[in-house]
Amino acid sequence: MKRILITIFIVLPAIAVLHSCGTEDLRPAQVFEIDPVFREYAAFDSTSYWIYVKTTTDASVGRFDTVRVLRTYKDKRFHSDATTPQGFYYQAIESVLHSKFTGMSKFELTVGKIFGQSSASDNLRVYFNNGRYYRVLITNTPFGEELLLGINEGNYTTIEKIPSLDIQGKTYSEVYHTKVVDYQNAPDTAYFDFWIARNYGIVRYKLYRPKSEPVVIDNWELLDSYVVPYTR
């Protein structure tokens, strides 16, 4: 009799746990892959490089900079938060960069759901050698709508998609123009504009700090490039 009572004590909690699990708990987590077209904007393999020229008036020092891809790799990650308790797996592609004056140190492509949206969005983050990072391109977001990404990444807006854009004597097609505001209303508030072209990546990058002393205006334009698509 004692053995039977012990068995019942063990089995009943297990049944209770199984009964409390809803259908949602038993479904496999979603898996998001980066869109192939989005990869053409930002996924470049090692040996790729971009030569930028600084066109602002204080460009006497460090007027040219070469940004090189040292290494690119693909990863699979998991994300879960209060709005997505079940979580989801997502693909990530990272490119480690070397640059001197533009400050870019890494590209990171990811995909996932943004709060309040039902469909997934692709993201391109650019990391800088001062420790800051920003999402500079987010798909599936309305043009002109500002997204508040928090203190770490500031505010993001997709301004427009330009069919054709001439920069430094070359024509680029299907170019996204985006804006990022970092540390809004602070003395060191930074306003960024990025122009990102299909098959080329960032073709122009502008930084404006109107409240700094002296005022900072950095405008980098793509002069030449050699890009190898990352296809793995």
Image (spheres, grey):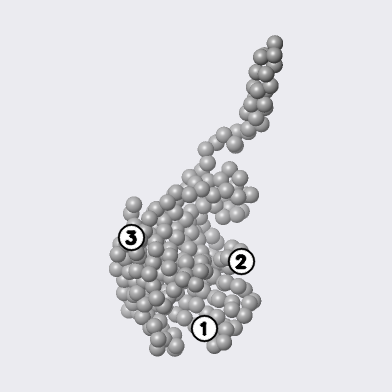
Between the residue at mark 3 and the residue at mark 1, the CA separation in whole angstroms equals: 32 Å
Which of 29 and 73 lies nearest the eye of the viewer? 73
Give SS at disc 1: strand
Residue for badge 2: 151
Residue type at mark 1? Val
Residue type at mark 3? Asp
Q: Mark 3 or mark 2, which has the lower sequence index?
A: 3
Residue type at mark 2? Ile
Answer with left or right where residue 229 lies relative to residue 57. left
Which of 104 and 2 lies nearest the eye of the viewer? 2
Q: Residue at x 60, y 73 (%)?
A: 183
Q: What x and y, as percent, mark residue 108? A: 45, 60
Circle 3 packing at 10 Å, graded few (<14), some (14-19), many (20+), is many
Q: What x and y, as percent, mark residue 52? A: 37, 76
Number of callouts in the render? 3
| Residue 148 seen by the camera | no
Between the residue at mark 3 and the residue at mark 2, the CA separation in whole angstroms equals: 31 Å
Disc number placed over residue 185 in the picture, else none: none
Give SS at disc 3: loop
Q: Would you identify the image quadrant in which residue 213 lies?
A: bottom right
Q: Mark 1 or mark 2, which has the lower sequence index?
A: 2
Task: Reply above or below: 37 against 29.
Answer: below
Circle 1 packing at 10 Å, graded few (<14), some (14-19), many (20+), is some
Residue for badge 1: 216
Residue for badge 3: 45
Which of 140 and 83 lies nearest the eye of the viewer? 83
Q: Mark 3 or mark 1, which has the lower sequence index?
A: 3
Q: Residue at x 54, y 86 (%)?
A: 215
